[in-house]
Image (cartoon, grey):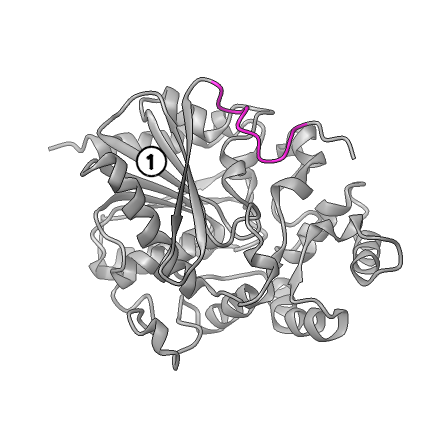
Amino acid sequence: MHRLIPMHTLEGVPDAEASVHPFSTEDGLGLSLLRFCRAECDDVVLLVHGLTSSSDMFIMPEHRNLVTTLLDGGFTDVWALDTRMSNRFPYDLQAPRSTLDDVALFDYPAALQRIREHTGERRIHVITHCLGSVSFLMSLSAGVVDGVTSVVANSVGLTPRVPAWSRVKLTFGPNLVEYVVGSPYLTPAWSKNRPLTRGWAVSKVVSLLHPECDVPACHMISLMWGTGWPGLYSHEKLHPITHARLGDLLGGASLSYYRHVLKMVRAGRAVKYDTHDARYSALPEDYMADAAAVQTPILFLTGEVNHTFADSNVVCFEALDAVASGRHELRVVPEYGHLDVFIGRTADVDVFPILLEFLTRQAHPTP
């Protein structure tokens, strides 16, 4: 297979010093941070990907990416985290199976500790996406991370809501995949499996139901997340190279995350998955219970045509604004969906200025 862009390349940010910072979590996983630094500054930015993606979504070389935009915008020390949900690691495809509680409890405290070892007491702003948004806000609400100056949460926060067809898939899909297909995960890579294998067959069937393009990975991604043709973005928003390499940008997803999301969707809010496991005693059963006490300003960002988490962030903003009026903000981006907010070919013009303006105000608040 010929790749137009190498996997996990750093070529998208050629004009900053790039360094890798490995760290370990309390429950025994090795994770890492990418640091892109032009100069030390008072305001450090941490980027957090969603499930199946990775830090690669922020450093794409086929168009102007978020890291470059932040560096050019005066935030000259940017860190991109690869959590246990990252496709740069094998954890989504193997046991033991994690949930969002594990990400919230173990990944973010360890990552922030490593950043502070290098940056001291500088202000930290966090930009999050998808289940990275959910899990980071869970961590913030539970009080296991603190000292965060501001947060941007894209697409979904503490009140996950999905379209009706997505709810059907969440309800029946994990058991069908695990007990009928015989896999503990879903992945866009199944189209590359040997012919007549189960994964190959699933991919072929899914592609029959998605005539909107000729990229099998794109079809599988719509099966895995969202409702639509496609479900996570609009084709018009993507660079052709991005569309061609979606199978590299988005990887496999453990079914345990789907089961946790389903529990949250049914509850109407972020809740703990296993309430009887003592390992998670530091976490609340209901993450919205103390959300009003979170002092960190949050910008709830979402695309106008979000076919993945629908109006989740509108609902979350309204719920928090009712108990902490004026603390948080909401921005709905016209014509955008779920993932194209970050990986769209003109996101640097349509979306990133919104993030820069918010971060600048938080870094230099009006007296």
The residue positioned 27% from the left and 36% from the top of the image is 118
Which quadrant would residue 278 be assigned to in this image? Answer: bottom left
For label 1, the crowd category at 10 Å Cα-Cα, with few meaning under 14, some 14 to 19 and many 20 or more, is many
Residue tagged 1: 45
Q: Residue 295: say if magenta.
A: no
The percent coordinates of residue 190 (x first, y second) are 75, 53
The residue positioned 25% from the left and 40% from the top of the image is 117
The percent coordinates of residue 57 (x first, y second) are 53, 37
In terms of secondary structure, what is the magenta stretch mainly? loop
The residue positioned 71% from the left and 45% from the top of the image is 218
Quadrant occupied by the C terminus: top left
Q: Is residue 177 above or below residue 366?
A: below
The residue positioned 69% from the left and 57% from the top of the image is 223
Q: Which residue is farthest left? A: 367
Front residue (pair 181, 63): 181
The percent coordinates of residue 347 (x first, y second) are 51, 30
Q: Is residue 199 above or below residue 303?
A: below
**Three-letter amino acid code at the position of disc 1:** Val
The percent coordinates of residue 143 (x first, y second) are 25, 60
Q: Is 140 left, or right, of 201 in this rendering?
A: left
Residue 146 seen: yes
Give the magenta range.
Answer: 5-14
Quadrant occupied by the N terminus: top right
Q: Which residue is farthest bottom? A: 276
